[in-house]
Image: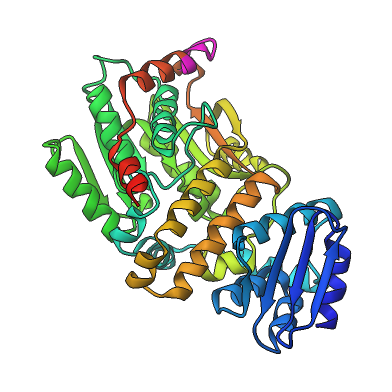
Amino acid sequence: MWLLDQLLKRLIHTGTLIVIDHDGREYTYGKGDAPTLAIRLTDKGAAMHIARDPRVGAGEAYMDGRLVVDPPHDIRDFILLVMSNARSVGGIDRKGWLRRMASGLVARADQFNQRAKASKNVVHHYDLTRQFYELFLDEDRQYTMAYYRDPANTLERAQIDKKALIAAKLCLEPGESAGVRVLDIGCGWGGLALYLHRHFGCEVLGVSLAPDQVKFAQERAEAAGVADKVRFQLIDYRDVTGTFDRITSVGMIEHVGAPHFAEYFAKTNDLLDPDGIMLTHTIGRAGRPGTTDKWTRKYIFPGGYIPAMSELVSALETTGWEVGDIEVLRYHYAYTLAEWYRRATMHRDEIVALYDERLFRMWQFYLAGAEQSFRHGGMVNFHIQSVKRRSALPMTRDYIQLEASRLSARDQAPAWHLDRVAAE
């Protein structure tokens, strides 16, 4: 316990953390002010496992039941307390410079996503059962940042507004887009593709490497009677052929890896019509380039990497693109993740029945940790419009909010999920 004790003494200054070791001995950290939170370590080796590599060890200890948070608090409260303190003292990474360099090299190597590896990495995260994602996502299964025009809005409302914002930035004309071809790279469960066709009549091809996502999206298109206009394929974006008037990339480039950014933008540039528009929606780093933490690479997103703006713009500049517009979306994902966490935790018994307690705890830790990255850390979201010809976009960006508001007003948030949640 000595090493963890020294670490927490330096770290916790705001709020109060009580650690109860496996032998019942209590340690108190902080200034005695609120919030007061207690955790228990259930075996002799738990403290050393956490202290040796805190960013990995804490997650693994929680997943394995070696770290337990006493009610009425939970792991989200613990993570937010620790990371809000870590921000003020400059982090909790105990690694020396040599180990940090080695970790960075390993993380960089993990981003070389050749075709077979890219497919395996995507399946690792997205091939959980449909029922699992239904327990915490909105009705449309939007598994990316929602857009909270008002923080008090429901998740359902915010996800509708997110789709409206993306559509507005594509500059599609109502009633005049029937012949427009859209490529949706990393199409998820098909919600955005179906949305674009429903509102604008455009033809959409969605591509993904997640088999069940593609299958479900195809089923949705068939059920809606639009399978001839909205198609989905299990294919690597590098194998797509043809020409498209618009390209959307929502939550996709995080899986590409920094070594492949230039390849990615070169390929999409080849696929886009000279007067076309591409909209890239991605999680981004508010600062300079970095690395994906080991726990996330190991358990959640193998091969994943969150890009810095400089990395994206550099890759765009070297592959024939011109940047038309950039928007930084700051706290929206924090609100989204907090709601996903709430719904997942509410459905604990169902998730444990589908998988086990360890996977439930792993997802709790992931969702809460990701939320703190957007609330207290250096993560934001980027929207980047890229074009081949600057004339493809209007002179000012007034059209974005006008069109997004028009589209949002046309869709009411579904009530079925809210009713189900209220009943439970």
What residue is drawn where x is 74% and y is 54%? 35
Q: Tell me what residue is drawn at x 55 percent, y 79 percent.
A: 64
Quadrant in the rendering for residue 346: bottom left
Is 301 above or below relative to 14?
below
Q: In the picture, residue 178 is in which quadrant? A: top left
> Is residue 400 shown in magenta?
yes
Front one among 393 and 23: 23
Residue displayed at 31% across by 20% down: 410
The quadrant in which the N terminus is found is bottom right
Figure disc tally = 0
Q: Is residue 351 left or right of residue 264?
A: left
The magenta segment is: 393-401
Q: Is residue 139 visible?
A: no
In the displayed structure image, the side of residue 381 where residue 143 appears, left or right: left
Asked which colour scheme the image uses, the reply is rainbow
Q: Where in the figure is residue 77, as x and y percent of width and height?
A: 64, 57
Residue at horizontal 69%, vertical 42%? Answer: 286
Relative depth, front residue between 294 and 337:
337
- Quick check: is 238 in the magenta stretch? no
- Is residue 42 something that shows in the picture? yes
Picture coordinates of residue 412, whole percent (x, y): 32, 26
> Where does residue 73 sit, x and y in percent of width and height?
62, 60
Residue 28 drawn at (x, y percent): 83, 69
Above or below 242: residue 298? below
